[in-house]
Amino acid sequence: MAKKISPSRDRRHERAPTALTKRPAPVASTAPPGDVALVFGKDEHGTHILRRRSEDAPVEAGVLRPLQSGKPIEGEVISLSPRGDTPLLFDVKSELPSPYPAPRPTSDGPAQVASDAYRKGWDAVWGRRRRDRSLN
C-alpha cells in the first residue's frame, strides 16, 4: 500500500528549516536626544503634548496654543520641528522663557503665617497684649 503525501508536506521537507522572518535592526536616530515633545491629542483648548527637556529631566504635560496678536502670552514660547523618524515626535526650541517666575521651592518646617511687618501692624491696630500681673 502506497502512502499519499500531501503537496504541503512535500514542500515542507524540500527546503531547509529557517528561522522566523528576519527583520532589519532598527536604525538609531541621528537626532540629538535633547528637548523633545510628543503630540498626543487636540481639543478646543489646544494641542496636548508631553515634553522632556533633557535625558535627565522629568516628562511634563502641556498645551500648545498659537500666538495671537494683542493677546497676552501665557507661558513659554517654543517652536517645533518635526523629526523624520516619527510623525508625532518633535524637536523643541525655546524661543522665549515663561514670563512667570519659577515656583518657589518649598522649605523644611512649618509655614510662616505672620511676618514681622504683619506683627507690627497688628500691634499698631490692636495694641500689645497686656500681661496679667495678678498672682494666681
Image (cartoon, rainbow, N blue to C red):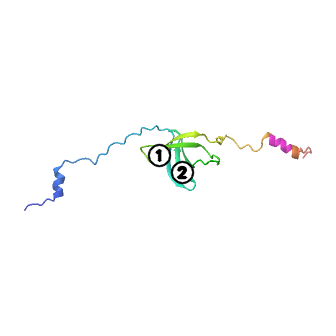
Q: Secondary structure at mark 1?
A: strand
Residues shaded magenta:
117-123
Residue appearing at x 52%, y 47% in the figure: 50
Is 68 or 101 nearer to us in this picture? 68
Residue appearing at x 75%, y 45% in the figure: 113
Residue appearing at x 56%, y 42% in the figure: 78
- For badge 1, the amino acid type reads Leu
Q: Position of residue 46 (x, y in %)?
A: 56, 52
- For badge 2, the amino acid type reads His
Q: CA distance from mark 2 to mark 1?
A: 12 Å
Q: Position of residue 49 (x, y in %)?
A: 53, 48
Q: Residue furthest front?
A: 69
Q: Is residue 128 visible?
A: no
Residue appearing at x 57%, y 56% in the figure: 44
> Badge 2 local density, few (<14 within 10 Å), some, or many (20+)?
some
Q: Is residue 122 magenta?
A: yes
Is 121 or 134 nearer to us in this picture? 121
Dominant SS type (magenta): helix
- In this figure, which residue is indicated by the disc labeled 2? 48
